Amino acid sequence: MTPPGPPRATETSTTCSTTPIPPPPDGTPRRSRLLVRDATTFEEGTPMAIQRLNHAVLYVSDLARSVAFYTDVLGFRTKVDRGRAAFLQAPGSTNDHDLGLFEVGAGPGPSQAGRTTVGLYHLAWEVDTLAELQRLAATLSEAGALVGATDHSTTKALYAKDPDGIEFEVCWLLPADLLDTVEADQAMALRPLDLEREIARYGPDTKGGIGVSSPVSA
């Protein structure tokens, strides 16, 4: 017998909903419209102004184990825990939640995405400074979760896996005012990450991503 799926927990805030539009007088088929927080209506076929990824949701085998990993190792805060679903907020975030975890039990096997199926490769969590990236490198290594570290020239990245083997990235991005320190032909180059060298080059407390992933302050 196929085990029942996880409960469809209701998230703590609703960003949008689909509502029907009454059919027009001429009897043509009615369409739906998307109501967004700012009350902007996007008619069918109109591009939506997506700004960023708001949150991710993962299926996990053991909720308590996964919550402990993301809170103890990565510093997330538990905002809501419903027994078989939990919603976590990243350190320093003002978002309602950044990560949702839904427990499915030990029955389902590990994800085969990228091996025998298509699917998600990884999520990438951004840190503010190289000092924080270095601290997390040590923390992830101590937890036995760190699986790699790559210098993408404009992005300094750690790669790790959670208790279910779901891969994620932790990264620091060069701010816009330092992008000219990277030669054009090296912008997409890959090499092993030497954190000590990059900290000596850019400083431990330089704020990353300014003007790239976050706006320049006025």
Image (cartoon, rainbow, N blue to C red):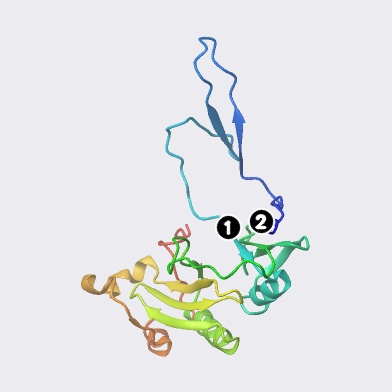
**Residue 127 visible in rendering:** no
- Does 138 sit left or right of 148 as displayed? right
**Residue 162: horizontal and vertical position, in percent?**
58, 75
Residue 38 higher or lower than 115, as above or below: above
Residue extending furthest toward the front? 1
Cα separation, mark 1 vs mark 2, equals 9 Å
Q: Quadrant of residue 150?
A: bottom left
**Residue 184: horizontal and vertical position, in percent?**
23, 70
Q: Label 2, on which residue?
A: 96
Residue type at numbered disc 1 = His
Structural crowding at the residue carrying mark 2, measured as other residues with C-alpha within 10 Å and reported as few (<14), some (14–19) or many (≥20) = some
Which residue is nearer to you in this view: 191 or 106?
Answer: 106
Please name the residue shown 35% across and 68% down the image.
Answer: 177
Which residue is nearer to you in this view: 173 or 29?
Answer: 29
Residue extending furthest toward the top? 26
Residue 38 higher or lower than 52, as above or below: above
| Mark in the foreground, 1 or 2 | 1
**Residue 100: horizontal and vertical position, in percent?**
64, 61
**Residue 84 visible in rendering:** yes
- Mark number displayed over residue 55: 1
- Contact flag, marks 1 and 2 (Cβ < 8 Å): yes
- Does 6 sit left or right of 38 as displayed? right
Work out whether mark 1 precedes mark 2 in sequence or the reverse, and give the earlier one.
1
Please name the residue shown 39% across and 84% down the image.
Answer: 193
Q: Quadrant of residue 33?
A: top right
